[in-house]
Image (spheres, rainbow, N blue to C red):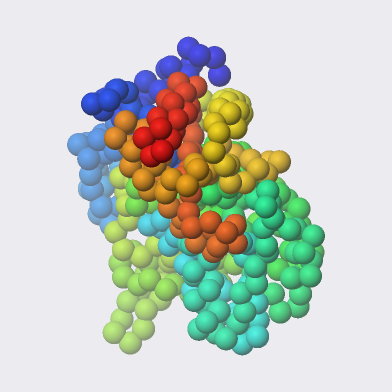
Amino acid sequence: MKTRQLLQVRQDFPFFSAATASGPITYIDSAATSQKPYPVIEAVHHFYTRYNAPVRRSAYPIAAAATQAYEAVRDQVQQFIGAADRREIIFTRSATEAINLVAMAFAEPRLQAGDEIIISAMEHHANLIPWQQLCIRRGAHLRVIPVNESGELYLDRLPDLLHARTRLLAITHISNVLGTINPLPEIIALARSRGIPTLVDGAQSAAHYPIDVSALDCDFFVFSGHKMFAPSGLGILYGKRAFLETMQPVFFGGDMIRVVRFEQTLFADLPARLEAGTPNVEGVIGLGAAIAYIQSIGKHHMLTHLQQLLAYATAQFTAIEGLRIIGNASQKAAIISFLVNDIHPHDMATYLGEAGIMLRAGHHCAQPLMTALGIPGALRASFSIYNNLEDIDRLSEGIRAAQRFFR
C-alpha cells in the first residue's frame, strides 16, 4: 500500500486516536488480538440499537431481521474461506472451542487404545491439549513433528509418523511464536494419500492470508473472530459436511433440537445441531463487517504491507547488539519473537509498556515449543495492517533504551 492508504487504514481504528502519557500508542500484539475498525464497531452498535433480538426463535419483525443478518454472515464466511456448503460453517465461542468440538464429537468416537494423533511441536496449547487429553482418555498416543533451530518442521520425518493407526493430523497454518508458515498443501496431500483426516488451526492466518479450504482439501479448519478485527467470543469451525453429519452434539440445550420429549430428543440438521444455546449474535454481525472490511482492502495489499513491515523489523532487530530473533523460517508471517541480552522478557515488556509500546512476553501458550528451543519464554512483536514503520522505529528505540536501563 502507499503511505496515504496506510494512514487511512490506521485512522479506521479508533484505538489509535488516544495516546499514552509518553506519546502515541504503539500496539504490536495483534497475534494475541486485533484492534477493531469503525465499520465493525458501528455494525455491533447498529445491531444493539436497531434490531437486538433472539435469532431463530421469535416471529416479530426485528427478530426476523436479526436472524436474516446472522445467517447472512454464515454465507459470507462460506465464501470467505471457499467452503462448498453453508452448512459446513459452525459458529462456536472460540477457535479453541472449535478444536475441542472436533476432538469430542469427531475424533473421540473413532479413537481406540493404541491409535495415534499427530500434531507439530509448534502448536498453540489450544491445538495440543485437547488431543493430549483425548489420547490420555482413550489410551492412544500423541505423536509430534519436531521443529529445527530455524523454526521449520522436519517434514521429512512426517511420512514415518503417518501409518495405519493414525486417526487425525492437526497442524497450525502459522506459528503464533515463530511466524513460520507451514506448507499446508504438501502436508495435507500426504495425509490425504494415507486416508488420514486433517485439521488446520488458522487462527493466525485467516485475517491476512488467502484461505480456500476446498482447494486445500483439509477436513476441518478453525479460526477466531477477535484476531481478524471482529469481536471477541466468536470462533468458526469449518468441517466437510460428510464428517460434520457424523458428529453427535456434545453441547445440549436450546436451538439445536427438532423435537424434545422427556424420553428422547431428536436433533436439528446442520448447522444448528452443533450450535447449542443463545449464540453470540453481535459477534457474528461484527464478523460480517470485519470480512467486508478485509475484502475492501484486499488481502494482496495486506500481505504486501505486512511483508514490508517484517523485512524492516528484521533489519532493525538484527542491528541491535544482544538481540536474538527466535525462528528464521524461509516462509514467515509478520511475527517476530526475540530475546534481548539476559533481560527477562517480562521486565522488558513492562519497561516498554510504560513507554506506550505494547507487545507480548511469555511462553505465548506454547510451552512445549519453548522447551524444544531451550528458552523459558520470549518477547513477541506481531504486526497488522494498522502498523507502520514508525511503530518499528519506536520499538527499536525502546529496546535500546531498555538495554541502557537494565545494564
Q: How many marks?
A: 0
Residue, far front = 407
Q: Residue at x 55, y 79 (%)?
A: 135
- In-front residue for pair 252/93: 93
Q: Position of residue 345 (x, y in %)?
A: 42, 47
Vertically, is 44 above or below 279? above
In the rendered image, which quarter contains the C terminus? Answer: top left
In the rendered image, which quarter contains the N terminus? Answer: top right
- In-front residue for pair 231/43: 231
Residue, far top = 4
Left or right of 194? Residue 353 is left
Vertically, is 124 above or below 250? above
- In-front residue for pair 241/34: 34
Q: Residue at x 26, y 34 (%)?
A: 46
- The answer to whether residue 83 of the structure is visible from this angle is no
Q: Residue at x 63, y 62 (%)?
A: 120
Left or right of 253? Residue 345 is right
Q: Residue at x 31, y 81 (%)?
A: 261
Q: Position of residue 142 (x, y in %)?
A: 61, 74
Q: Determine the image quadrant of residue 282.
A: top left
Q: Position of residue 278 (x, y in %)?
A: 29, 59
Left or right of 343? Residue 314 is right
Q: Position of residue 134 (x, y in %)?
A: 52, 77
- The answer to whether residue 187 of the structure is visible from this angle is yes
Vertically, is 342 above or below 304? below
Q: Determine the image quadrant of residue 28.
A: top left
